[in-house]
Every structure is written in C-alpha cells, then in structure tokens.
Image: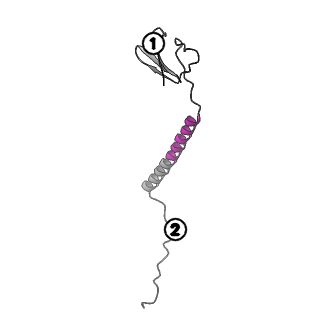
Amino acid sequence: MSPSSPRVTPDPGPPGPLPPDLRFLKILVTTLAGVMIVGLVTIIALLVIRLSAAPVPLALPDSITLPDGATAQAVTLAPGFMLVLSETEILFFDRNTGQLERRYPLD
C-alpha cells in the first residue's frame, strides 16, 4: 500500500437488536422522562390556578361585631383574646364573650 491511497473501511451493516437488559433500561428511562414531564406540567398548572385565584375574603367568628365603619384587615387569635386590625385602629375582643375590650388608634 502506498501512503497516498485512502483506507477503506467496510460498511458495518445494520445494527442488531438490543440486548434484553439494555432494552428494559431504555423503556425505564423513557417512562421516567414521561412521568417527569407530566409531573412538571401538573405542578405548573396548579401554581397558575392557585396564584390567579382571587383571595378569600376574611371571615370573622360569629361572636364578633365590628364597630361601624371598621373593616377587618387582619385577625389574630390568641388563647384569651382576639385582635382585629382595621385601617384606622387595633381592636381587642374577649375570645369567650366576643365583647370589645380595648381600642388603639393607629397614627
């Protein structure tokens, strides 16, 4: 053979069937990829649904009656009292009776 002649490699031909273990592994990897894609789409869909929903209005217990013109912005429940934050003041209610005990105006 002279140095200028190209080397010719024989055509390898079509590949044979995969061994059973490798075929099983290929099925497992494909199934795992599909399950991961479905899970990711589900999580994204749930996030979009939850984050785009309107917030639930704040519900006070039935035993609490707010003074006229007050709207509850936040409610904190403690063992002995209930604190209601409105736009203009902080209201303390007795938890057992539901009676207004103290009012603190906000500056």
- Which quadrant of the figure has residue 7? bottom left
Mark 1 neighbour class, 10 Å CA radius: few under 14, some 14 to 19, many 20 or more:
some
* Residue 76 - label: none
Can you name the residue that lies furthest to the bottom here? 2
Labels in figure, total: 2
Q: Mark 1 and mark 2 in contact (Cβ < 8 Å)?
A: no
Segment tinted magenta in the rendering: 34-55
Q: Nearer the viewer, mark 2 or mark 1?
A: 1
Q: Is residue 24 above or below residue 5?
A: above
**Viewer-proximal residue among 46 and 103:** 103
- Which quadrant of the figure has residue 54? top right
Q: Position of residue 83 (x, y in %)?
A: 46, 18
Q: Amino acid at mark 2?
A: Pro
Question: Is residue 14 a member of the stretch shown in magenta?
Answer: no
Q: Is residue 50 above or below residue 86?
A: below
Cα separation between marks 2 and 1: 81 Å
Main SS of the magenta part reads helix
List the residue tagged with mark 2: 14
